[in-house]
Each structure stands twice: as C-alpha cells, then as structure tokens.
C-alpha cells in the first residue's frame, strides 16, 4: 500500500503491507515480500512497514504475545510462527502496541478517582453519551476531537471526513449508546471515550455462515450469542490538546468503569503505544492487566 497522506503528515517515504497470511514457509513469505517491495520501490518508497490494514485507523500489528485468548473486535489474530516468518524476511520491530484487560472485579483506584472527582467538580465540564439519533452531527463533532487528539501519535494520520464517517457507520452497527461517551467543556466537545461490545463472539458463534442447508442456523447462533456478550473493547480515548491536564481522561475511564461494574462486563483497552507512558501508567493505576502485544515491523527497501 502507498499512503501519500501518511508520508505528507510524517515527512517520510514509507510504504506498507497488510492483510498478511502465509503458511509456515519462509520461502513463500520471502516471495510475497519481494513482490511487495518491488511494487513499493517503483513508487519511490524507501521502507516497508506492517502489518497495517489499511491504516492505523484500521487493524494493525502482528500478535507476538497473548495467544491464549481470542482477539477483541477489530483486533487481528495470527499464528505464533508469523513472528519467525517476518524476522527471517529481514523485518525488525518498529513499534509495539499493547492491549490491557479490565474486569468488574478490579478494585477502584483511589488515585484515579481523586483526579476524576477534581475534574467532575469543575462547573464547566459535563459528560454525556452519544446521540445516535443525530448521527451525522455527532460524527462531525467526533471527527474534530479524534483528528486532533491523536495528531502527534506515532503512525497516526488524521482520517478524512469521508473515511471517518465510514468508520463511524461500521461501529454504529454494533454500538451500545451508554458506552460511547463525550466530555464537553462549556458545551464544546473536548474528549471522547468510544467503547463497543465485543462482536467477535457473535461472529465466532455463527461459524462463518449465516445459513446452513437453507436454514438460518448461523444467524440464530449469532442472535443467541449476542445476548450473552459480557465483554467490550475501548477503542479510543483521547483529549484535545488544549484540555489536557484537567483530568478529563480519568473522569471518562472512571465513568466507563462504573458502567462496566453495573452491567458486569469486562473490557479490553486496546491498543496503546508501548511508549505512551502517560496512558499506560493511567491504565495500570486502574488495575488493568497487560495481556497482549502486537508488533508493527519495518524493513528498508
């Protein structure tokens, strides 16, 4: 993949690969990457990063730790031998992405609660859930926060309005409104916390087919599984630059934790850059446990 907007934003000449799958065969992997490298070099690119499908706003990374549990919704999964394949083809680590697990039994954090309470006592601050009946207007507000909150993150490229609307529509299919939170200061969106039910459990129950022998067996299995979902994934937690340091992130996560305890759901918080010390420290203080590591690799062309 050639993503000109990535290189414009970060000032590089990177190409990407994604949707990688291969038998445990180094020669086959080398043939794939050789062809991909040729394609990228023809476009004047000097390095190849991945797996990224198709940008960091989508699925990215190759699982290198945490194979014993299934992936959360919109997170990848791959066999352990992928690491050996990639390294045998000359790829080295570019960045690790971490996943954390929080459960309703996790004790409350006095430190995080103290910061959240201070933020809550500010008269200009409020938290509300998204109004899915005003989808277009809400999407526009979220796009503004999302694009600014992650602007300086490694690998991030602010999505276009069209791209963000597409992502929002996809997530709306599985959304639960009380898990979609916005913090506002003087009525203006300042931070967001977007969490969705783990729909992978529905897909797994369907077994890859909605019908069998002309009967909606998979559809029925999916419907039954949907009633038993007790897990979600926090996919985005961000604060606009001008509102950082005011405890909005702590207030949002404590609000989400209260909802999780009330409905009895666990939550995967993913993904977080390994060197995002502030976010990883805050998550650890909440009592969450790090469970998975995903790696983005790089290779010079």
Image: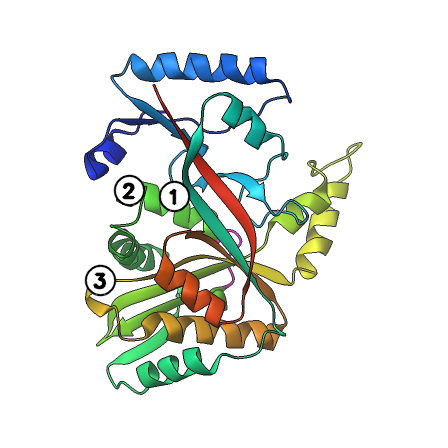
Decide: is 17 above or below 117. above
Tag shown at residue 57: 1
For the residues marked 2 and 3, what is the alpha-carbon distance in whole angstroms?
16 Å
Q: State the image quarter where residue 28 is shown.
A: top right
Residue at 54% over, 66% down:
288
Split into 4 quadrants, where in the image is the C terminus? top left
Which stretch is magenta?
Answer: 172-176
**Would you say the magenta stretch is mainly helix, strand or loop?**
loop
Residue 157 is marked as 2
Which quarter of the figure has residue 23?
top right
- The colour style of the image is rainbow
Circle 3 sits on which residue?
241
**Left or right of 159, for residue 294:** right
Mark nearer the N terminus (2 vs 3): 2
- In the rendered structure, find residue 77 and report the number of the disc placed on it: none
Tell me if label 1 and label 2 are in contact, CB under 8 Å: yes
- Side of 151 relative to 62 (left or right): left
Q: Examine the structure image and report whether residue 125 is included in the region drawn in magenta.
A: no
Residue lying furthest right? 213
In the displayed structure, 266 sits above or below 50; it is: below
The CA span between labels 3 and 1 is 20 Å
**Mark 3 or 1, nearer chain start:** 1
**Residue 173: x percent and y percent?**
51, 51
| Residues tagged 2 and 3 counted as in contact (Cβ below 8 A) | no
Q: Nearer the viewer, residue 226 or 65?
A: 65
Instruction: For marks 3 and 1, give the one nearer the viewer.
Output: 3
Q: Is residue 166 above or below residue 271?
A: above
């Amino acid at each position: 993949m050639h993503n000109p907007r990535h290189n414009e934003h970060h000032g590089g000449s990177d190409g990407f690969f994604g949707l990688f799958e291969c038998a445990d065969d180094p020669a086959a992997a080398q043939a794939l990457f050789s062809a991909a490298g040729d394609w990228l070099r023809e476009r004047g690119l000097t390095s190849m990063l991945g797996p990224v499908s198709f940008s960091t706003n989508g699925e990215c990374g190759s699982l290198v730790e945490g194979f014993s549990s299934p992936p959360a919704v919109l997170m990848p999964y791959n066999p352990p031998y992928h690491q050996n394949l990639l390294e045998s083809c000359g790829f080295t680590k570019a960045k690790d992405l971490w996943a954390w697990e929080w459960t309703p039994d996790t004790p409350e954090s006095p430190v995080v609660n103290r910061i959240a309470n201070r933020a809550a006592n500010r008269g200009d601050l409020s938290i509300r859930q998204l109004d899915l009946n005003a989808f277009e207007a809400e999407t526009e507000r979220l796009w503004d926060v999302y694009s600014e909150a992650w602007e300086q993150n490694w690998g991030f490229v602010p999505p276009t309005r069209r791209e963000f609307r597409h992502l929002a529509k996809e997530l709306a299919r599985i959304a639960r409104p009380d898990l979609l939170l916005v913090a506002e200061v003087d009525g203006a969106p300042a931070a967001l916390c977007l969490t969705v039910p783990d729909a992978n459990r529905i897909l797994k129950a369907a077994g890859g087919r909605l019908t069998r022998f002309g009967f909606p067996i998979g559809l029925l299995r999916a419907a039954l599984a949907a009633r038993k979902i007790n897990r979600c994934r926090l996919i985005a937690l961000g604060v606009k630059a001008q509102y950082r340091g005011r405890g909005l992130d702590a207030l949002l996560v404590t609000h989400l934790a209260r909802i999780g305890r009330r409905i009895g759901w666990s939550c995967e918080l993913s993904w977080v850059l390994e060197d995002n010390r502030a976010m990883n420290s805050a998550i650890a203080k909440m009592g969450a446990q790090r469970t998975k590591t995903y790696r983005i690799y790089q290779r010079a062309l």
